[in-house]
Image (tube, coloured by chain):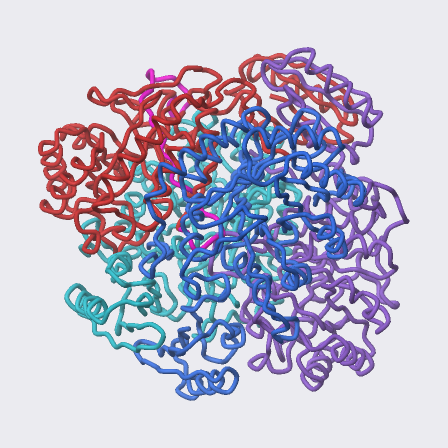
Chain colours: A red, B cyan, C blue, D purple
Amino acid sequence: MIIHMAEGASPEQTQRVIDRIWTDYGLHCETIVSATTVVGVKGITSYVDEGRILELPGVDRVIRITEKYKDASRNFHHEDTIVDVQGTPIGGPHLTMVGGPCAIESESQALESARMAKDAGVDVLRTFVDKSRTSPYDYRGLPLEQGLEIAQAMMAETGLPSVSELIDIRHLDAFLKAGISIIQIGARSAQYSPLLEELSRVDVPVILKHGFGNDMNEWLCAAAYIMSGIDREGRTVGSGNRKVILCYRGIKAFETETRFAADISMIPLVRTKSHLPLLADPSHSSGDRSLVERVAYAFVAAGAQGVEFDIHNNPEEALVDGKQAVNSEARRIVENARKIHAMLAGVGIETGSNAAGVPAG
Amino acid sequence: MIIHMAEGASPEQTQRVIDRIWTDYGLHCETIVSATTVVGVKGITSYVDEGRILELPGVDRVIRITEKYKDASRNFHHEDTIVDVQGTPIGGPHLTMVGGPCAIESESQALESARMAKDAGVDVLRTFVDKSRTSPYDYRGLPLEQGLEIAQAMMAETGLPSVSELIDIRHLDAFLKAGISIIQIGARSAQYSPLLEELSRVDVPVILKHGFGNDMNEWLCAAAYIMSGIDREGRTVGSGNRKVILCYRGIKAFETETRFAADISMIPLVRTKSHLPLLADPSHSSGDRSLVERVAYAFVAAGAQGVEFDIHNNPEEALVDGKQAVNSEARRIVENARKIHAMLAGVGIETGSNAAGVPAG
Amino acid sequence: MIIHMAEGASPEQTQRVIDRIWTDYGLHCETIVSATTVVGVKGITSYVDEGRILELPGVDRVIRITEKYKDASRNFHHEDTIVDVQGTPIGGPHLTMVGGPCAIESESQALESARMAKDAGVDVLRTFVDKSRTSPYDYRGLPLEQGLEIAQAMMAETGLPSVSELIDIRHLDAFLKAGISIIQIGARSAQYSPLLEELSRVDVPVILKHGFGNDMNEWLCAAAYIMSGIDREGRTVGSGNRKVILCYRGIKAFETETRFAADISMIPLVRTKSHLPLLADPSHSSGDRSLVERVAYAFVAAGAQGVEFDIHNNPEEALVDGKQAVNSEARRIVENARKIHAMLAGVGIETGSNAAGVPAG
Amino acid sequence: MIIHMAEGASPEQTQRVIDRIWTDYGLHCETIVSATTVVGVKGITSYVDEGRILELPGVDRVIRITEKYKDASRNFHHEDTIVDVQGTPIGGPHLTMVGGPCAIESESQALESARMAKDAGVDVLRTFVDKSRTSPYDYRGLPLEQGLEIAQAMMAETGLPSVSELIDIRHLDAFLKAGISIIQIGARSAQYSPLLEELSRVDVPVILKHGFGNDMNEWLCAAAYIMSGIDREGRTVGSGNRKVILCYRGIKAFETETRFAADISMIPLVRTKSHLPLLADPSHSSGDRSLVERVAYAFVAAGAQGVEFDIHNNPEEALVDGKQAVNSEARRIVENARKIHAMLAGVGIETGSNAAGVPAG
């Protein structure tokens, strides 16, 4: 952590910063004086709250070297993490295709979509019982128990592991009891700390999306909430849940012709910055069936270790997001994605300290 | 609701749209055929899920006339809503100044800040027990009971109503029991539906912020979650909670020199579009103490019916966001805000149907 | 074009809109009355200035069916445009690799970089004499004549066609005289109409980037400035320049860890909306050498018909944007890009009227 | 300037940075070694091109202390600049109201709008001969000479100084000859360096807007282009033009209900960072007549030293942007703006070194 004192900051102000770092965090500092004074903090500074330092008089800005999202950072865990989901490895050199309907609407729709996904060759099946919606008037899923029964039938029918979005903390037990293989955290819950903390206490793989207003740091900090086992009062209350799989889905930007801006540079960048497996979602980023296929290929070419996309047996009748679900193209998408992945297997992602993600001037 | 069919859509596709609208929602349609076909849906369409219509073959886009956020819309409730908080009216012609520390850190810090806020002339006191943070390693508040006891002491000391952010649903009972006057929903929980639904079942005023990735529609739909009394399965399970107060706090944008982009046009626009009281937060939008004062005045001049800002007895020692808290300037801010509000009392906010918020070409 | 009247608009207001459309543009209208009145304008409406319609009393919003950027729209030119550059076809089924130094700094740097690009297998050489810079204190290029001489030497050495950015209109003649094969318009000039108009009067291929604050509509309208041959006073003064090649480079968004947000969905979307050849620039979007390779592959996988990227013989000594230039990886990038392109040759881009780019709910 | 070396950078890499700074810019460095190495550059570093430093091996990021936009920075010119326009002072403690039609459409429209603006009490008259438009098919102004004649008639009629947007460099002489008092640079030309450079060579006040994709640094660097008198090849070829007036107009963001996001914090921030006069434009930011009045008041309350807004004698018939022009409200806007300005005259804008604009954590 490097602390830049403002122009005209007094030596007393600088000393106070140094004292604060020592008394609060037990870390030593060193300084240089040029046009302004710069204070370098030595050691692991993930736990230092830069807000507290920033507020000291005379401090102009604080730059982190040690990332805030320690547990999710490749600096602290150099090798790719591989998450095992019922024998299916996610991350590392593997490509994981996740597909299925955006939401469970009925038994027949769910089972037909599941068979279509299985036939297409996906590794993990979407079995979404709850749907987070912008408006309270929109469809938000079948009753919980009915939905979970259908999810189980989908797994039984296909023999595939499953992923379901968890919205309400109070549903977690029912999800685990029903045998959901992976819990997904969606965009609207992506920074909701009580939910993230709850997942740090269970031993189940989690697919973590980011909010459409979140940057990389916020996303990886959300992963750290699940991984760290630190409670609201700062106590380490467990070993945390290390089985976190990231899934990129694009952010809000000013272009109105696409649903979200899926910044393709984020794929190799997040691979560089974090050791966690990285998937990407072409359905929810592009928002349009006619774009999903090409965007899926692009994510794989960029280095994503998997793709999660909507497959629906009858998109025109879908209750949720049918506009972005593919149908019979699913098989071709899975096949071509695997070909691109295989072709580029030899081209590494830079993961060393030279792989700076800092933008050029 | 106006449905635009794509170029080349067939008459059968158009008919199918019309049939779907009738069978699913019981609404009638009328069409015109120009370069393309346009279908107008008659009646109240807040309950129509445009996603379902969009996915029908041949549909190009769907335009709402009736807003999605019906309960929060001025089209359905022309007069300003005024929320009563223990005798303090919020909304309508009133200006409500809300102030206090960003978070409760200790009894002395909280009480001194509360006295400073009271002296400054605020109407409602910030008594924040929980703090939502990006990183799990940062300070997130004192233990719940200790925090609530201090919040009660702050109220007792000043005689002011209080507002506290609720993050964990499971804390709601404790908040209400402790006598917190207003529940605040913060940016990171702003679209977390289980929390919003829970608040629809209690009779307590709510200050609702928007997420920093949310647009106006998403914000007002979140208000509708609290107001509508509709449950996850679409049933009306109560009359909902109508005591919603909006608080604007800016969105993420590409400028890095300010914390969030507080789009000032949103103030008169939201006043036009919604009947709910509208506050704004200059501390969390600007992120810098040296900007808070002027931004507070601007919000009032733009038509905000109140300002919520951070006041800290000793910003340099604050555990959370001290950089954006004001100190002795608080009194001047309250006084000048009231002067600007009084001066502009005669200048109305357009609330009729001519007040279009649609941007020009 | 569909015109939505506001709630409560009078029949007289609607009639006035219809009259205005007829008197100003000679187009007929049809209306439907549902909750509000909708007016459909028949015929080609590219020339209708929606701002003029919007300002009429009672008008709520105007929706285009016929795009504003008529000349660049696939609706008016269904087949892919292929631009011939000295025998090298750009667009259609072809993949064009454009590479070379970000700017010409010296004869040796330029020639060595050119040889490296040639060896890597590029089709077109970057020979950038002028550089547009944010700050006046930064390097903006060698003197014009010296720069152009080196550009000519680069072409002579490699036998490749060249592309150079034109900033100052007054340099156009010198560029053409020096034999520059393609004129590039950069982000900072992307909406500067006098420059675009000047290019509509010459017969030279143009690579058109978009500004980092521009959306798709603004970008394609800039293309229409070059293509249409319409002058400032609305007169058709020539047949325009049809040899426009688009190059995507990402937009400003709130993420600070990447230079610009390169929204990957834009690649298949722009292919759908426009018949013009589409390249993409992984160097200027990602801003980081360690990301360029993977982003280049992603662009091709998404359907880009070419890639323009920075190759520098000695990036560490580059005067401009060395951080984003590749060196010896260039050859591998070209080879793998061609492989991905060949593999996906059979997977079309949807270009019919069903390929809506409208985002889902 | 502070240079952060990457983790694992070698001592040789650090030494090379230090050598480069010395050989290229004649500046000395000092270093500290903590978790990583930090190099502090001493002296005035506005002329240092951080891109060149960033590209050196082992460099992770470069932080400026001395701003890039030296000539526009308050650090180099502490007092407010006041620009004299034919006896009307702009900047410092003065409030300047600029109004008139968005564009000159006809003699009668222009003269009636001018009289309305004069009656409303504006200090400077908008006399816009050229209009920059997104699409080539839209109205871009009357023929140059006819437009300038009308502009002169508007000045003669009202006795007010005038401002006109200059788009085409080749029109500058005609503008100056016609007696236009202030040249305006609009959003689409805001980073077009040949135009900015041309204005550095004439002695005429300039109102400089920023592009809707520009951040504060890019805007103030554009001001530096006009002020510095440095040519394309880095030579100081004149004393530059110091009469630059900034005008804020909002940026692109994801909210679609307002035209541009006018981040209100930018007003006190830019006042802090630059000594130049700062106006703001409520018409082009909000894009809607019903929002203009309140947004104008907000800009003044935030510390803007003037407002530029559209006044049209008959907005419904306007050829350009009529939706955002006010009519008879103009007088009330001018009066109330002056009252707010007078009331807040005693509340300073912080301009010292404690006024950091750096966002809190």
Quarter assignment of residue D181: bottom right
Q: Is residue A264 left or right of residue B302?
A: left
Residue at left offset 13%, top offset 39%: A115
Residue A10 is at least partly visible in this image: yes
Provide residue A59's location: percent of width, then percent of height.
67, 29
Provide residue B312's location: percent of width, then percent of height.
58, 37
What's the magenta bit mostly, secondary-structure-wise?
loop
Quarter assignment of residue B338: bottom right
Q: Is residue A267 left or right of residue A151?
A: right
Residue D252 vs residue C156, the one in the foreground:
C156
Residue A239 forms part of the magenta stretch: yes
Quadrant of the frame with the C terminus of chain A: top right
Q: Which residues are magenta?
A: A230-258
Provide residue B125's location: percent of width, then percent of height.
49, 45
Residue B313 is at least partly visible in this image: no
Q: Is residue A78 above or below residue B301?
A: above
Q: Is residue C22 above or below residue A206?
A: below
Residue at left offset 34%, top offset 17%: A237
Quarter assignment of residue B327: top right
Quadrant of the frame with the N terminus of chain A: top right
Residue A196 forms part of the magenta stretch: no
Q: Is residue B89 above or below residue A279?
A: below
Residue D22 vs residue D173, the one in the foreground:
D173
Total numbered circles: 0
Q: Is residue D7 above or below residue A245?
A: above
Residue D169 vs residue A41, the one in the foreground:
D169
